[in-house]
Image (cartoon, rainbow, N blue to C red):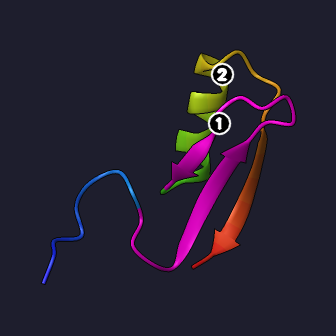
Amino acid sequence: MGCKCGGKARGGTVWVLSYEDGRAGGEFVSKTDAEIADVRKGGGGIVRQVQR
């Protein structure tokens, strides 16, 4: 049985950051984390909620 620690969500709701211009986005455990990552990558990303 694995621990539930770490940066990636293992189930439930995750927030996905994506870009139309081909830049890598990612999955985050909170909307705030995704928005911070977007700013660090220069902005312009789309953050959406996904059920896993």
Which residue appears at 51% of the width and 79% of the height?
12
Q: Secondary structure at mark 1?
A: helix
x, y percentage for residue 11?
45, 78
Query: Where the C terminus falls, by quadrant?
Result: bottom right
Could you tell me which residue is drawn at 65 percent across and 53 percent down? 16
Question: Crowding near pointer 1: few (<14 within 10 Å), some, many (20+)?
Answer: some
Q: The N terminus is located in which quarter?
A: bottom left
Place residue 17 in its image quadrant.
top right
Q: Residues within 10 Å of mark 2 (few under 14, many from 20)?
A: few
**Above or below, comparing residue 19 to residue 41 in the picture:** below
The vertical placement of 1 against 30, above or below, is below
Contact, mark 1 vs mark 2 (Cβ under 8 Å): yes
> What residue do we see at 53% from left, 54% from top?
30
Task: Identify which residue, 31 or 50, lies in the foreground.
Answer: 50
- In x, y percent, where is residue 15? 62, 57
Q: Which residue is mark 1?
A: 35
Work out how far the residue at label 1 is from the one at label 2, CA to CA, in angstroms: 6 Å
The magenta stretch is: 9-28
Residue drawn at point x = 57 percent, y = 73 percent = 13
Q: Is residue 13 magenta?
A: yes
Amino acid type assigned to the residue bearing label 1 in the image: Glu
In the picture, measured across the screen, residue 49 lies left or right of residue 28, that is right
Answer left or right for 51 relative to 12: right
Q: Position of residue 9 (x, y in %)?
A: 42, 65
Q: Residue 40, image x and y in percent?
A: 58, 18
Pick the residue in front: 36 or 19.
19
Q: Which mark is residue 25?
A: none
Residue 39, labelled with which disc? 2
As shown in the figure, which amino acid type bears the numbered disc 2? Val
Q: Is residue 8 magenta?
A: no
Q: Considering only vertical position in the picture, is 43 above or below 11?
A: above
